[in-house]
Amino acid sequence: MSAPHHSGDAAVDRSVARLNIEHYKRLLARETDEASRQQLLRLLADEEAKIADSRPQEPKRRPR
């Protein structure tokens, strides 16, 4: 069971995700092994998804 998230926790989570993204991009720039590159791409996509999921959703507009 995890502790409830507070608003500050989300900011920290986004900061960590951004740092991980930068790290994975640096590793990808030098990695030549295809299996390792695929793993890094999966990790990168996971971190990018975390940032996208943590953004506030815009209210949906009803069609007229």
Image (tube, helix red, strand yellow):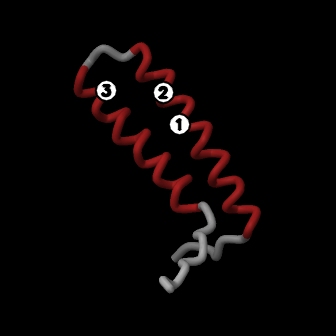
Place residue 20 in its image quadrant.
Answer: top right
Q: Say if 47 sits above or below 38 in the image.
A: below
Instruction: Check whether the beta carbons of the residues at disc 2 and disc 1 lie within 8 A of each other.
Output: yes
Q: Would you name the residue on which mark 3 appears?
A: 37
Which residue is the site of mark 2?
Answer: 25
Residue 55: percent from left, percent from top: 60, 61
Residue drawn where x is 58% and y is 69% of the image: 57
The Cα atoms of the two marked residues, 1 and 3, are separated by 14 Å
Of the image marks 2 and 3, the number of the one nearer the N terminus: 2
Q: Identify the disc placed on residue 49.
A: none
How many residues crowd mark 1 within 10 Å: few (<14), some (14–19), many (20+)?
Answer: many
**Badge 3: how crowded within 10 Å, few (<14), some, or many (20+)?**
some
Q: Amino acid at mark 3?
A: Arg
Q: 52 or 5, which lies in front?
A: 52
Find residue 25 and report its horizontal and vertical position in percent: 48, 27
Residue beneath label 1, please?
21
Query: Looking at the picture, does residue 11 appear above or below residue 61?
Result: above
Q: For the residues marked 2 and 3, what is the alpha-carbon distance in whole angstroms?
A: 10 Å
Q: Nearer the viewer, residue 13 or 61?
A: 61
> Disc 2 versus disc 1: distance between alpha carbons?
6 Å
Q: Are marks 1 and 3 in contact (CB under 8 Å)?
A: no
Identify the amino acid type marked 1. Ile
- The residue at the point 76 percent across, 62 percent down is 8
Amino acid at circle 2: Lys
The structure residue drawn at horizontal position 67% and vertical position 46%, both measured from the top left corner, is: 15
Residue at 30 percent of width and 14 percent of height: 32
Q: Secondary structure at mark 3?
A: helix
